[in-house]
Amino acid sequence: MKDTVARAAEGPRVGDAGQLALSSDFSYPPIERTGASFEPAAMQRFLDGEHRAVRELVKEVITQPEFRYFESPDHHAFRKQVLAWTKRLADAGIGRVFMPKYVGGEDDPAKFLAAGETLGFHDLSLMIKFGVQFGLFAGSIQRLGTEPHHRKYLADAASCQLMGCFAMTEIGHGSNVQALETTAAYDPTHEQFIIHSPTFSAGKAYIGNAANDARLAVVFAQLEIAGEKQGVHAFLVPIRDESDRTLPGIAIEDDGYKMGLNGVDNGRIWFDHVRVPRTALLNRFADVDSAGKYQSQIRSPGARFFTMISTLVGGRIAIAASGNSATKSALTIAIRYAARRRQFGPGKPTGKETLLLDYPAIQRRFMPLLANAYAIDFALKHLVALSTKISDGASRTIDTLAAGLKAWSSWNTTRTIQVGRESCGGEGYIAANRFAALKADTDVFATFEGDNTVLMQLVAKNLLTDLKDHLKDMHPVQLTGFMLNQKMTGFTRTMPLFTLNTSRYHLLNANVQLAYFKYRESGLLFQVGGAFRRLTKDREMDAYTAFTRLQPELLELADAYVEREILERFIAVVENAPDRTLHTPLRRLRDLFALYHLELHKSWYLENSVMSGFKAKAISRLVTGLCAEVRSDAVALVDAFGIPDSCLAAPIAL
Amino acid sequence: MKDTVARAAEGPRVGDAGQLALSSDFSYPPIERTGASFEPAAMQRFLDGEHRAVRELVKEVITQPEFRYFESPDHHAFRKQVLAWTKRLADAGIGRVFMPKYVGGEDDPAKFLAAGETLGFHDLSLMIKFGVQFGLFAGSIQRLGTEPHHRKYLADAASCQLMGCFAMTEIGHGSNVQALETTAAYDPTHEQFIIHSPTFSAGKAYIGNAANDARLAVVFAQLEIAGEKQGVHAFLVPIRDESDRTLPGIAIEDDGYKMGLNGVDNGRIWFDHVRVPRTALLNRFADVDSAGKYQSQIRSPGARFFTMISTLVGGRIAIAASGNSATKSALTIAIRYAARRRQFGPGKPTGKETLLLDYPAIQRRFMPLLANAYAIDFALKHLVALSTKISDGASRTIDTLAAGLKAWSSWNTTRTIQVGRESCGGEGYIAANRFAALKADTDVFATFEGDNTVLMQLVAKNLLTDLKDHLKDMHPVQLTGFMLNQKMTGFTRTMPLFTLNTSRYHLLNANVQLAYFKYRESGLLFQVGGAFRRLTKDREMDAYTAFTRLQPELLELADAYVEREILERFIAVVENAPDRTLHTPLRRLRDLFALYHLELHKSWYLENSVMSGFKAKAISRLVTGLCAEVRSDAVALVDAFGIPDSCLAAPIAL
């Protein structure tokens, strides 16, 4: 063996490998940026919108040298780094912008969400730590607590003097919050609540900040007064002392290494008859007086429950938005690489190979995902505007939209990063090019802050409830008109041969696109509603069993609803874009969004005879054509996301 | 702040958290295993097939205590561990089973592939290291070299005395192997080849074993004799000496941290006029005599090229098979968890919540993927049987099937692991439950050993070439008959109302299922073939440009071909299964595989008017029903994969 290796290596050598250029000297050919129809800076201004200043502030912080990505595989050191970064954001005042002015805040939750969205361009552990500390922990004190709680805790939470956690989920109760086992029994003698985990499965699970940093926990528990259950309420429970020692009665277990987000210290918490004062109840929507009398201005236990967990709405928006930021990072890296990498060609050995971005298969992969990223951006801005208008109580409209967009967009994030990784081949697999972290960190977005499948069922159930509310006061004549309108929309009935028209003019008409989306949504709504009635009324099934039976249909209905919401918003954006130079690229993206999803769901339209086979084929051809058109803007469209180079970091994209 | 935490913690405590059961004492409720229609052991025997002994041998090795999964995040230490594991496999004699008997082997490549497939149940870094060392490095010496090479190197390679690498891919030339830049110029004076990387992008890229362990490289380079190019050939080039120092003229760069497979030391290699003796050419299919005369029994440069890279076929089969093993691990973990985890229920607070596996949405997610895993298993066994029959040269049939199955099944692996992760919620995100590693390690399967998208285009082009070969000798009358047969198959023309029949009897008929699959494949084949002819003949486009234009259609054609191949195999397996107790579960899986894919592609059938909307809806209902039927066998079907507990390792699955 030794001989072999040594002998074969013989012979004169011309040079030494030291003469070869190594990668430090090397860069890929320049990214090809010709042919865009607009200025990326103009598009970025449009995307940044009214919160440009805070986005710039966040970017200024996260592009500082100490925000270089952490490279050690030691997750304990990584957690410390992320904690330090979080404190830097707090120092810059970003943690308090949503808080009331009387604790030094700006009372501007939309601005806070814009900050979180921008943070999504950096390491996602930082975004999640930021979200846990400010959004969930401080956010629930603000939302569920009253002024005394605010004055006592919020400023310290905003400055990271007081680190906290949001202890809702339990080991045995991931999605089913109403079934939480942790109890908070009121002891009138001492005017205390006794927080207790009766079983192992009652342990709070996957709690961010729990393993290391949190001193105070917002604990969701079943309130019991004199043996009577009052439902889930939130309590402030100290879990560590000022020296970070776990307090008596508290058991904490580190979740250890995870698929991603290893800069966040997740853990499990159990409580063994831990006593907290009566004032530990976050008492904005319900209170217990010293004698143990329960009071709430919200009479329905169901409504009260949804109000108590409404902190999750902001969290869901933040997850969707920062997930979409990760999507944008992946698209930027992959599309820039595809705009400089060449492979295969017309076969002349001396000729240039073809740019990846010029391949129809690559265009077909990326352009619809680029349209999705823009579409989600606009839909989320609309949702933020809606949600910040509602200061009190819960809104089913907003809950539904937030749940739906969170689920739809986090799945889109997973899919986009996957496509980006694969399209970059081996380069995509090298950690330095960021897909590894983007993928692993965002993977959990599909299941935390509400499992996507559960959320989509919630969406569908809300739609059915809306429909029932809507129908119950109608006269039969109104009802018929309503049904017809829903089914085909007034618009389509005025167009002859709607199902057959394959003209470009027709297919690029926003009203036509929207009519199809509405038709699918309402068609599924009536179909599921009818099936539900048959199961519950005719076959006397209970509602739970009937909904379970209809799960696949509920998921499809929710999908149709979200896509229609997104398209409506996209149409409004194109109509109202103030900068006319952006009209053409935005309109193309909207057309691609609309037609790509018509293509995706064409079997439904074909099955239901509202689209001919010829029309379906025409739509597919048009999608291919639109992908080629958007391709000429593709690099400008990702440049317009405005992601700092130090955040992108991937050598293949710079 | 300090006051707050301290004060709120006051009050008497009933107990200490030490009294609480912690997770070490905890286990989930038992996995519910009732209701299966067969014995898992019988199914496992059937799946293990003729190579049961080597599967058991591999399992015996990988379940030894020292094969416990490596938990340190230090990838340098992890590489050492994986090297040690690889040597243990070598010690057990597993590395040499495919080698010729005259070097101590068993001349049994099928047995070797079964070993690799079983290894896929363990850490995938080990499988890849094993594949690099034995399959690619030693395999290419065996396949492309001659007896002197075999005698000199193979025994040492099999024992890991000689570690080596397979240096084909280059930085600038991932998929386009014909465009490799590395040169091997013959110097008749010294009777040597001069191996050289003329540019940075000529560096060999993502080469497993290169960063640390390899001493000898099989280098693919453009052979040049007296300035004349002879195409890509393979050369043995020493890269490290016996003390593991890099040899003069060689530059190696570590690829560093990757998304996964961090137990494998990938790196880049450049050569600066490195001289090797004339005997370093692996000369089975072409040789250069001392005077510099080039000789090859394969006259066509194209055919020669495909023979030279045919080592990849075995690699592709191994990737597909070990990827399917990872798929099986993910399914086992996720389905077992779903068979013990309950969430939500009929609403009675005292009643049991519903088992995840009893939700239609979960059944709809998992059961088709379970059918896919079985289907791929059978298709790969068939491919192995075919490929081991061919000892010499290349076979287009086998190349096509290997490329197609590798792409189709590696995408299926990625999708299945993703669904498994999401279905386990937070538990799926905890590294201990294995989805993190399964996902990250197999992600690259879609792009190495041939990028899936490139492979699928290769498949489609081969199908078009086959069609052309088939048609060219036909008379017009024969041609018409052939076209009709392909289009609708003789079988369907005998069935009236084929497109409308929605009966269960009809839909569960294997001939009906296959007729639909064939119809899609041949329909797409003729459609793409026609389009190609129009572009090249009528519009005088060159073949490259025409194929590029048709990329999306080529990918769909390849997909249809692979699925038809898989279904044909599945039908044969059901017909021939010797153990009749397995007939029902296998048949159900086959029906689900067939109907699920009919549903998936129903828009194509609807567009092309070979399936009515009513029939499409009936198929969807039947898929839902089949999912519920397969559900009762689900746990037994994953138990039958026979994955050792220590390999599964996930606490939620044990």
Image (cartoon, coloured by chain):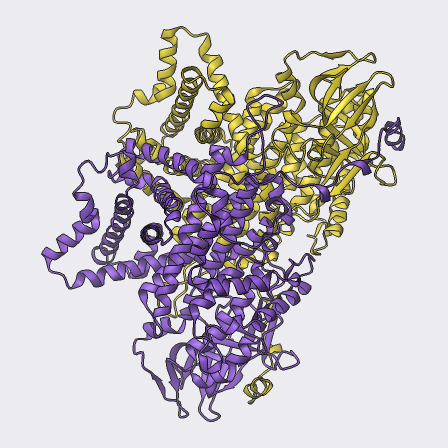
Chain colours: A yellow, B purple
Asked whether residue A615 is in view, the answer is: yes
Q: In the displayed structure, would residue A419 be above or below residue A446?
A: below
Query: On the rendered image, what quadrant is the N terminus of chain B found in?
Result: top right
- Asked whether, in this view, residue B487 is left or right of residue B279, the answer is left
- Asked whether, in this view, residue A87 is left or right of residue B3, the answer is left
Q: In the displayed structure, would residue B212 be above or below residue B368?
A: below
Specify the farthest residue to the top. Answer: A475
Figure label count:
0
Measuring 64% from the left and 78% from the top, which residue is drawn there?
B244
B189, A5: nearer the viewer: A5
Measuring 21% from the left and 58% from the top, which residue is drawn there?
B537
Asked whether residue B233 is in view, the answer is: no
Question: Can you tell which quarter of the image residue B109 is in?
Answer: bottom left
Q: Give x and y (percent) for residue B52.
A: 47, 62
Q: Give x and y (percent) for residue A520.
A: 39, 27
Q: Give x and y (percent) for residue B654.
A: 61, 47
Q: Give x and y (percent) for residue A616.
A: 31, 37
Q: In the displayed structure, would residue B189 be above or below residue B339?
A: below
Question: Can you tell which quarter of the image residue A430 is in?
Answer: bottom right
